[in-house]
Image (cartoon, grey):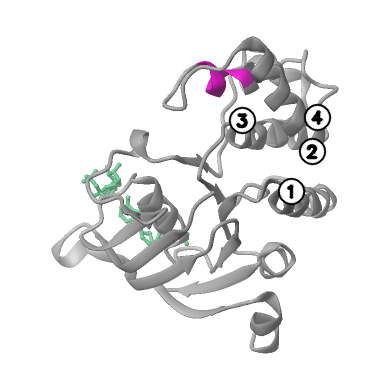
């Protein structure tokens, strides 16, 4: 876990007439272990914000710090973040277990022993309620189960910061509510720092320790769920 500081961040895609200002002077401090939600409509700049933290877009103004260290010039691979995208991909020819183990068998965090892999996979799949599915292949899973496995692939890898981009968007309402509760529990238990993006007001209120409301690239409000709820 680590603090995340986003300092005066601006990002424009393209140039001239086709320029789109995705973020304008965004300034946020996220505490160690905080479950921080960024709430805003489609096009507000939420994904761009996460990608800036992950190092997946070039930032022309401002800075991102993780654990007090400037990420200026630090390659995505060298940032200790794990990002989940809205569209998840699983390896179709691998079992659920191997899908979950693959992030632990390669990558910057180094390799884990078979026993360590089993331990981490067991912890994550128990929380996500998918530990009975380890021997199945993705084609043998429902959409909701697939999304859980995909989320598990992100959470299984130890990271300072988890970046979650609408991870529940493809679930039906019932499963979404259930996963929300599980995610909240996971956040509280693991004590990791998470940046969670959603356009869903109820989801933001249910999950966030704090919420930033983003509109047209600008942070228009930051507060606890109670504060955000009082001033909708
Ligand atoms: P959100 O995640 O809130 O939907 P995004 O960060 O995806 O918002 O997009 C913010 C704005 O930047 C939108 O107007 C979007 O069209 C634009 N944008 C995002 N990515 C690109 C890109 N690669 N090239 C050009 N414009 C982009
Ligand atoms: P870079 O130019 O270093 O790749 P950018 O922030 O400009 O950094 O782009 C980030 C991502 O968005 C890249 O994958 C890039 O291809 C894509 N992108 C940037 N501008 C546009 C655009 N106008 N239309 C579509 N995709 C874009």
Residue at image coords 53%, 74%: 213
Marks 2/1 in contact by CB < 8 Å: the verdict is: yes
x, y percent for residue 3 = 47, 58
Quarter of the figure that contains the C terminus? bottom right
Image disc number at residue 189: 1
Read off the magenta span: 101-105
Crowding near the residue tagged with mark 3, few <14, some 14–19, many ≥20 C-alpha atoms within 10 Å: many
Judge depth for marks 3 and 2 and give the one in front: 2
Q: Is residue 146 above or below residue 74?
A: above
Q: In this figure, which residue is indicated by the disc labeled 4?
A: 130
Residue at image coords 68%, 48%: 168
**How far apart, in angstroms, are the residues tagged by discs 1 and 3?**
18 Å
Q: Nearer the viewer, residue 200 or 132?
A: 132
Is 41 within the magenta? Answer: no
Judge depth for marks 4 and 1 and give the one in front: 1
x, y percent for residue 206 = 74, 65
Q: In this figure, which residue is indicated by the disc labeled 3?
A: 153
Q: What element carries label 1?
A: helix
Q: What element carries label 3?
A: helix
Q: In this figure, which residue is indicated by the disc labeled 2?
A: 127
Q: Is mark 4 on a helix, strand or loop?
A: loop
Label located before the other in sequence (2 or 1): 2
**How far apart, in angstroms, are the residues tagged by discs 4 and 3?**
12 Å
**How far apart, in angstroms, are the residues tagged by discs 2 and 1?**
10 Å
**How far apart, in angstroms, are the residues tagged by discs 4 and 1?**
18 Å
Marks 1/3 in contact by CB < 8 Å: the verdict is: no
Residue at image coords 45%, 68%: 29
Label located before the other in sequence (3 or 2): 2
**How far apart, in angstroms, are the residues tagged by discs 4 and 2?**
8 Å
């Amino acid at each position: 876990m680590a603090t995340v500081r986003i300092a005066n961040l601006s990002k424009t895609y393209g140039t001239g007439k086709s320029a789109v200002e995705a973020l304008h002077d965004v300034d946020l401090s996220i505490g160690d272990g905080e479950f921080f939600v960024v709430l805003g409509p489609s096009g507000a700049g939420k994904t761009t914000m996460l990608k800036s933290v992950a190092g997946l877009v070039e930032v022309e103004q401002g800075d991102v710090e993780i654990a007090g260290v400037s990420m200026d010039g630090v390659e995505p691979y060298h940032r200790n973040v794990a990002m989940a995208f809205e569209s998840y991909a699983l390896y179709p020819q691998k079992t659920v277990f191997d899908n979950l183990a693959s992030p632990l068998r390669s990558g910057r965090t180094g390799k884990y022993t078979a026993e360590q892999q089993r331990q981490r996979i067991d912890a994550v799949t128990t929380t996500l309620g998918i530990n009975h599915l380890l021997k199945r292949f993705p084609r043998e899973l429902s959409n909701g189960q697939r999304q859980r496995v995909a989320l598990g692939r992100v959470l299984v890898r130890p990271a300072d910061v988890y970046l979650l981009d609408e991870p529940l968007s493809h679930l039906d309402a019932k499963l979404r509510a259930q996963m929300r509760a599980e995610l909240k529990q996971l956040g509280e238990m693991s004590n990791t720092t998470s940046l969670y993006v959603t356009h869903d007001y109820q989801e933001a209120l249910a999950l966030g320790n704090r919420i930033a409301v983003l509109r047209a690239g600008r942070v228009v409000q930051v507060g606890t769920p109670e504060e955000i709820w009082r001033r909708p």
